[in-house]
Image (cartoon, helix red, strand yellow):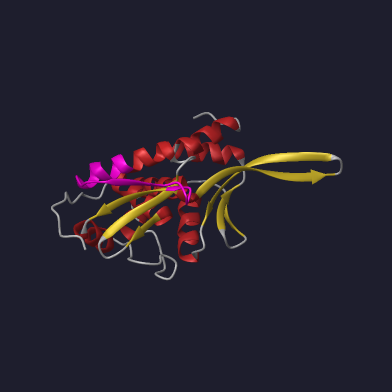
Amino acid sequence: MSSRKTVTIPAHSEDLAEFFGIMIGDGCITKYQISVTLDRLTDSKFCEYVASLIGRLFDVRVSIRDRPNRGCVVIVVSSIAVVDFLTSNGLSIGNKIRAGVDIPRWISDNSVFAKACIRGIFDTDGCIYLETHRLGSGVYRYPRMAIVSASANLRYPLNLIMRDMGLSSKIRNNRSVTIERFTDIEEYFKMVGSSNPKHIGRFTAFGGVG
């Protein structure tokens, strides 16, 4: 059990909204601690960024636990005060899908915070990939961007926020929010950006300008 250690309680900000997006994507909250689970190879640099972001926001001790047998790294903060702060500001303890994970209103009602939150969600639950189509003897590959979520409560506000930004996003197969025009993917990176080097590298490899 974690005691109630003294932590900094941050004001609503762009950094905090990005952290909420990270928690919505790959975070977990229990009664006594929060954690973020990332790929130990592809997300190694991003792991350092997330740990630094948490430490900067809450002025709290952050543990990074390597789990090579599971192929992941788990960033952990044991603090009831942090748990209480996150839950009082719109996140939930336990299974996010059953809890109806959504973007908190203090974020969705602020365009700057909304972009930062989407950045956090995409950096954890998003991908950039090549979609292949065959037409006759030709093979055509198109860059696509997607945020995958099993929660309709999350897909719909994500899609709405991106459309409000002027992007031609859509919900695809009831499992992801996608951007399928490369010019719109470029606009996304101009307006929202990424804090995850793997996404920046992939975007650049497909011809984007970071």
Give how far across and how far down residue 130 sits, in percent: 65, 41
Judge whether 97 appears above or below 148 on screen.
below
41 relative to 75 in the view: left or right: right
Seen as rendered, the residue at the extreme bottom is 98
Instruction: Please indicate, yes or no, whether residue 195 appears anywhere in the rendered image.
Output: no
Judge whether 90 appears above or below 169 on screen.
below
Instruction: Please indicate, yes or no, whether residue 87 appears anywhere in the rendered image.
Output: yes
142 relative to 169 in the view: left or right: right
Give how far across and how far down residue 17 sits, in percent: 33, 49
- Magenta stretch in the rendered image: 51-72
Quarter placement of the N terminus: bottom left
Judge whether 109 appears above or below 54 on screen.
below
Residue 40 forms part of the magenta stretch: no
Residue 71 forms part of the magenta stretch: yes
Comparing 182 with 94, the one in front is: 94
Give how far across and how far down residue 152 sits, in percent: 50, 65
Residue 144 is drawn in which quadrant? top right
Residue at image location 29% in from the left, 40% down from the top: 52
Seen as rendered, the residue at the extreme left is 6
Comparing 124 with 194, the one in front is: 124
Residue at image location 49% in from the left, 64% down from the top: 151
Give how far across and how far down residue 167 sits, in percent: 53, 46
Residue at image location 49% in from the left, 41% down from the top: 188
Judge whether 113 appears above or below 106 on screen.
above
